Image (spheres, rainbow, N blue to C red):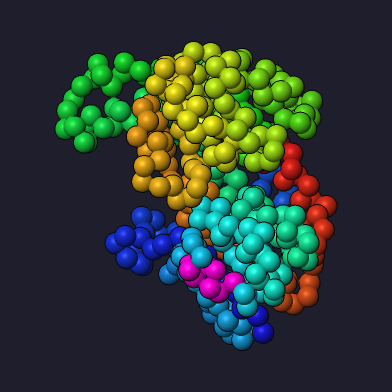
Amino acid sequence: MAKILAVLYPDPVGGYPPDYARGEIPTITGYPGGQTAPTPQAIDFTPGHLLGCVSGELGLRRFLEDRGHTFVVTSDKEGSDSDLDRELPDTDVVVSQPFWPAYLTPERIAAASRLRLAITAGIGSDHVDLPSAIAHGMTVAEVTFSNSISVSEHAVMQILTLVHNYMPAHEWVTTKKGWNIADSVSRSYDLEGMDVGVLGSGRIGKAVLRRLKPFGVTLHYCDVHRLAKEVEEELELTWHPDARSLASSVDVLSIHAPLHPQTMNLFDDELIGAMKRGSYIVNTARALIVNRDAVVRALNSGQLAGYAGDVWYPQPPPPDHPWRTMPYEAMTPHVSGSTLSAQTRYAAGTREILECWFDGRPIRPEYLIVEGGGLAGTGASSYTVTE
């Protein structure tokens, strides 16, 4: 029998279970390109319920305990005396989410002699040190595509929020109890007619491009893998060979690249300085792709008109993180891929992976990042600007 450790985010402040705004959610059976949604043998949760927090348990407890496994759930993941560090030495499987990552560092992996499987409930497994996982003989898997559309919708929302100056206008009628129309519109523009670009045209980036097309914008993109000619023609895309060419050509830039040595700290003072004055950046990918303080400086100087992000470093960030107080921001706490709709899919996908693992059946290839000590065939996309 195995021990499964799930590191999930804390319950709602008001307690669990919460009230739900909707009685049901649409059923999604597949994604663009033909991949099917997760297909576990069964589920023990109600679609649309809060599953990603500690009490939600990703709907896994009955399934795991009926099979005789030990299931431990915690939100405590930081520091040497955390539940994560105390439980790891005899853990076989770790499950966490990009929104509340269990950072599997080389030291933690070395201390976990039994650890053989790390599952990301969602997409984005850069909280796992892959070289150490390979050396340790681990499999690393994630629920590919389960929340890609969720993130793309969030990115479009943040673009519109920045350009239309939504946050300050909302503040005037709520926090300030005012009705100051001139103040609300003094930084408000139309997206129509602007040049908008995405860095990374994988599942999320391409979905953003498709959703932006009806807004009457000119679309640009940069990716090491150029999209098919018919897609470029359909969306009237301009391809750029590098990030600098893209950044200097657009009014709005949305980041959808993975974090790796070539993208870390990419948007520094120099690259942001090469953008048009008054540009906007939206980052739903990884916080370390941009330089934290360079963003603050650019907002204060007016080089950037706005920055919206859904990703921070570390996560959660400390109370004095400068992105909490910088001007012209529309930050969210890494929620884009954790809608209740997405939770239904990634909880089902996590169960599907576990079913395959325990039954000795192959995990579907699109879920694999590292398989038993070697890079999986489809996992190589994690190292290129595709996600």
Return the residue found at the far left. 177
Q: Is residue 82 above or below residue 335?
A: below
- The magenta stretch spans which residues? 81-88
- Taking the spot 40% from the left edge, 36% from the top edge, the residue there is 322
Q: Say if 24 sits above or below 93 in the image.
A: above
Q: Is residue 38 visible?
A: no
Tell me if residue 220 comes above or below residue 136 in the rendering: above
If the image is split into quadrants, where does the C terminus sit? top right
The residue shown at (64%, 53%) is 125
**Along the line of sight, the residue nearer the viewer: 287 or 220:** 287
- In the image shown, does 92 or 282 lie closer to the viewer? 92
Image quarter for residue 331?
A: top left
Determine the main secondary structure of the stretch shown in magenta: helix
x, y percent for residue 77: 50, 63
Q: Position of residue 79 (x, y in %)?
A: 49, 62
Residue 160 lies, in percent from the top left, at: 44, 28
Q: Residue at x 34, y 63 (%)?
A: 18
27 vs 317: above or below = below
Residue 310 shows up from this direction:
yes
On the rendered structure, is 331 left or right of 19? right
Q: Nearer the viewer, residue 289 or 16?
A: 289
What is the count of numbered marks? Answer: 0
Screen quadrant of the N terminus: bottom right
At 49% from the left and 23% from the top, the residue drawn is 280
Depth check: give the residue in front, 367 or 24: 367
Say whether residue 122 is magenta.
no
The answer to whether 186 appears left or right of 303 in the picture is left
Instruction: Please provide percent x and percent y for residue 314.
Output: 50, 47
Left or right placement of residue 361 versus residue 343 in this view: right
Q: Picture quarter containing residue 112?
A: bottom right
